[in-house]
């Protein structure tokens, strides 16, 4: 956590110094809400005498922060460095069932599988171009960012078996996941000018990653934008 804030501070300080004699820059900081698909969904399948029910992906809303530094190359184009973090003490779960018959004429047996993802901590570090339409008090923008995502959370699986007149107790398995992978964000928003060097920002992004999560995530961020070098 301190590492991410340290990186943001170094980048912000460097850009602030550079902006005195170089391109204009913008610093954004604020609150961010992330809706993450912690456990991917699965489809229903039938293979010989085995049937597995599908399940929708398990999502969880997380609160966090979002900050970025943009160096303006043109009035309508800038290069953005973006950082964000999301946290929750809650959990998300999915339940699937598997029914099968070990032989012709045998009684059907069933397994109920519950997957749980809990206490996630997710950090994103992204970079890329941002395009804006400069004009008036309201300035819309869009960006495409790529980089990495680090995920830290606990995963568990409980399997309960039944059949042939016997129900076996749940067999739990759990483990800690800490993984970093490729991430991408596509989105945009609007800046509303409060005064010459200060604006309020609202933005939304579609996120996807390969860091031990499913693929479909959404974040919504809002906060203040400081404009340097005007």
Image (tube, grey):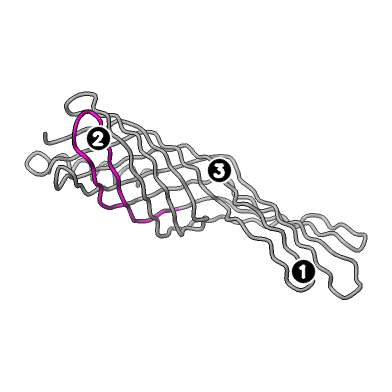
Rendered location of residue 193, percent (x, y): 23, 27
For label 2, the crowd category at 10 Å Cα-Cα, with few meaning under 14, some 14 to 19 and many 20 or more, is: some
> Residue placed at 79% from the left, 63% from the top?
99
Q: Is residue 213 left or right of residue 20?
A: right
Which badge, 2 or 1, comes first in the chain's sequence? Answer: 1
Q: Is residue 164 above or below residue 228?
A: below
Query: Is residue 199 a member of the stretch shown in magenta?
Result: no
What residue span does the magenta drawing correspond to? 127-150
Q: Which residue corresponds to mark 3? A: 60
| Residue 212 vs residue 188, the one in the foreground | 188
Q: CA distance from mark 3 to mark 1?
A: 31 Å
Rendered location of residue 124, percent (x, y): 39, 49
Rendered location of residue 169, percent (x, y): 82, 55
For label 1, the crowd category at 10 Å Cα-Cα, with few meaning under 14, some 14 to 19 and many 20 or more, is: some
- Quarter of the image with the C terminus in it: top left
Query: Please, what secondary structure does the residue beneath circle 2 have?
Result: strand
Choose mark 2 or mark 1, whichever is in front.
2
Q: Is residue 211 above or below residue 74?
A: below
Q: Is residue 220 left or right of residue 21?
A: right
Circles 3 and 1: CB distance less than 8 Å? no
State which quadrant residue 195 falls in: top left
Q: Which residue corresponds to mark 1? A: 50
State which quadrant residue 8 falls in: top left
| Residue 89 vs residue 49, the one in the foreground | 49
Q: Which residue corresponds to mark 2? A: 139
Which badge, 3 or 2, comes first in the chain's sequence? Answer: 3
Q: CA distance from mark 2 to mark 1?
A: 56 Å
Which badge, 3 or 1, comes first in the chain's sequence? Answer: 1
Choose mark 3 or mark 2, whichever is in front.
2
């Amino acid at each position: 956590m301190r590492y991410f804030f340290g990186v943001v501070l170094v980048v912000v300080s460097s850009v602030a110094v550079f902006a005195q004699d170089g391109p204009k820059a913008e610093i954004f900081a604020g609150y961010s809400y992330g809706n993450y698909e912690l456990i991917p969904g699965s489809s229903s399948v039938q293979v010989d005498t085995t049937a597995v029910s599908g399940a929708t992906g398990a999502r969880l809303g997380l609160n966090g922060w979002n900050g970025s530094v943009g160096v303006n190359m043109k009035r309508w184009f800038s290069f953005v460095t973006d950082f964000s973090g999301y946290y929750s003490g809650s959990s998300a779960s999915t339940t699937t069932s598997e029914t099968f018959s070990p032989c012709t004429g045998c009684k059907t047996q069933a397994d109920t599988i519950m997957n749980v993802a809990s206490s996630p901590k997710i950090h994103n570090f992204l970079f890329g171009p941002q395009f804006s339409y400069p004009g008036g008090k309201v300035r819309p923008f869009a960006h495409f960012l790529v980089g990495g995502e680090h995920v830290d959370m606990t995963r568990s699986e409980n399997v309960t078996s039944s059949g042939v007149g016997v129900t076996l107790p749940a067999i739990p398995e759990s483990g800690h996941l800490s993984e970093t992978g490729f991430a991408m964000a596509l989105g945009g928003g609007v800046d509303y000018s409060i005064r010459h060097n200060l604006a309020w920002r609202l933005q939304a992004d579609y996120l996807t990653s390969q860091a031990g999560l499913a693929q479909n995530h959404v974040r919504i961020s809002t906060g203040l934008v400081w404009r340097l070098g005007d």
